[in-house]
Image: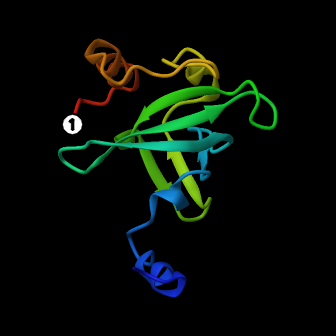
Amino acid sequence: MLNQGELGRSEMGRLIGSDKVEGTSVYGADRNRIGSIERVMIDKVSGKVSYAVLGFGGFLGLGNDHYPLPWQSLKYDTELGGYVTGITTKELEGAPKYGERSDWNWGDDAAVRGINAYYGVPLA
C-alpha cells in the first residue's frame, strides 16, 4: 500500500492519478473555460482511457449536462493547467450529452460511434 508521500511522487512527470484528472478544467478552442472533467472512462480490456465526461452548464453542479469527449480530443496545456479541446462552447451545445437524471448507455455502439463522429475522432 502506498502512503501519501509515495502517491505524490508517483504522479510526477507524465503520469497522473485518475482522481487528479477529475475536476480538472477543460478549455475550448478559444481558450475559455467550458467546464471540468467529472469522470474518465477506461477500456476494461486495453486499460486505456477512452473518454472524459465533461460537466457543463448548471449552477454549483446542479443542472449540469454531461458530455462524453473522446480522450484523443483533449490535450493538456501546462500554461492553463487544464485540458484544451478543439471545439467552442457553441459547438458543445450541439454535442451528444446526457442530463443529470439519466446516464449514458456505454453499451450502445451506435451512440459511442456518434460521439467520435461528432468530434471527428476515429474509434480507437
**Element marked by disc 1:** loop
Q: Nearer the viewer, residue 1 or 13?
A: 1
Q: Position of residue 65 (x, y in %)?
A: 63, 24
Name the residue tied to disc 1.
124
Q: Nearer the viewer, residue 7 or 27?
A: 7
Q: Residue furthest front?
A: 1
Q: Position of residue 107 (x, y in %)?
A: 30, 21
- Number of numbered discs present? 1
Q: Residue furthest right?
A: 59
Q: Position of residue 101 (x, y in %)?
A: 63, 18
Q: Position of residue 82 (x, y in %)?
A: 57, 55
Is the residue 81 above or below the residue 4 in the image? Answer: above
Is the residue 15 above or below the residue 108 in the image? Answer: below
- Crowding at label 1, few (<14), some or many (≥20) Cα neighbours within 10 Å? few
Q: Quadrant of the C terminus?
A: top left
Please report the residue visible at 59 percent of the width from the left and 29 percent of the height from the top: 88
Q: Quadrant of the N terminus?
A: bottom left
Please report the residue visible at 44 percent of the width from the left and 66 percent of the height from the top: 16
Kindly identify the amino acid type of the residue bearing the numbered disc 1: Ala
